[in-house]
Amino acid sequence: MPFSCQKKMKMTDYFADRAAEWDKPGKIEMADNFVQALLKHIEPQPHWKALEIGAGTGLVGLQLLPRVHSIVFEDTSEEMLKVLRSKIDDNAHVEILHGEISKYRSSDIDFVFSNMAFHHIEDIPKTLEHLFAVTTPGAKIAIGDIRSEDGSFHRFDPVPHKGFDTDELSAQFEKAGFRVLYVETYNVLRQEKIPGKLSDYEQFILIAEKPTM
C-alpha cells in the first residue's frame, strides 16, 4: 500500500509539533556521532556546494557549513526550517528548500548528506535517480540511518521504511549509477520504545560517489 498523502501530512505535523524542542541532548549527540562518522570517510572541500536531505533544525548541516562553500538545506517541515532560519540569519552561503528534494533542479551539487531522514522517503529509487541528476561527476554521498528493525523504533509514526537492509540499499545506489564505497555500523542506539523493553537499533553510514566518467 503506498505511503499516502494523509500519512505524509501526519509526519509533517509530527515534526511541526516538535520543532521548537527538537534540539535536545539526545538529538545533538546523534548528529555529532553522524558527523564524526562522515568525516572519517569524506573530507569536505571549501569549493563544494552541498545538499542536506531532511536538514531539520540544522544539527548536522551547520557543523559542516564552515567546511564547504555553501549548503542547500532541504526539509518538508516548515516549522523545522523556521528553527534553522533562526540560527543562520542572512547567510549568503545557505539556501533553504522547503518541500521534496525533487524541487531542486540544478546539476551543481558536489556533496549530499542525510542523517536519519531516508526512512521517511517513500520512493528511494526515484530519489536516487534525482540525486544522480543533480550531482556533479565525483560527487560524494553520505547517508546515515538505522538498519532493519522490528518496527518499534517508529512504533506510532507513519514512516515508509522500518530501517534498511544495507545490501538492498547499496544495490539501489548502484542501480542509480553511484558507486558504493563503504557501509558500516557507527553507533548503536539503546532506547525503550516499548515500555519495559530496551531495544538496540544499529545506525549505519553509507558512503557513495558519482563516477567521474
Image (spheres, rainbow, N blue to C red):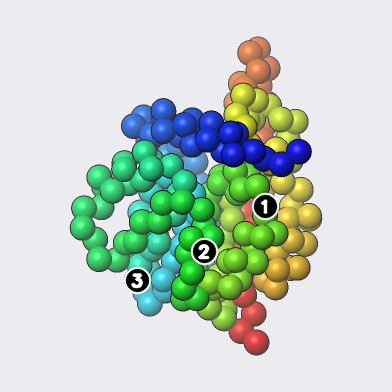
Is residue 182 among the parts visible in the rendering? no
Reply above or below: 45 against 199: below
Mark positioned earlier in the residue sequence (2 or 3): 3
Q: Are marks 1 and 2 in contact (CB under 8 Å)?
A: no
Disc 1 element: loop
Mark 1 → mark 2, Cα distance in angstroms: 17 Å
Crowding around mark 3 (Cα neighbors within 10 Å: few <14, some 14 to 19, many 20+) is some
**Quadrant showing the C terminus:** bottom right
- Front position among marks 1 and 3: 1
**Quadrant showing the N terminus:** top right
Name the residue: 59% across, 39% down. 5
Q: Which residue is mark 3?
A: 69
Going by the numbered disc 3, the residue's amino acid type is His
Mark positioned earlier in the residue sequence (1 or 2): 2
Q: What is the quadrant of residue 48 in the picture? A: bottom left
Name the residue: 62% across, 75% down. 210
Residue 112 got which mark?
2
Q: Which residue is mark 1?
A: 123
Image side of residue 180 versus residue 142, left or right: right
Mark 2 → mark 3, Cα distance in angstroms: 13 Å
Image side of residue 29 versus residue 102, left or right: left
- Front position among marks 1 and 2: 1
Name the residue: 44% across, 54% down. 74
Disc 2 element: strand
- Residue 195 picture location, percent across and down: 63, 13
Going by the numbered disc 1, the residue's amino acid type is Asp
Camera-side residue: 186 or 176?
176
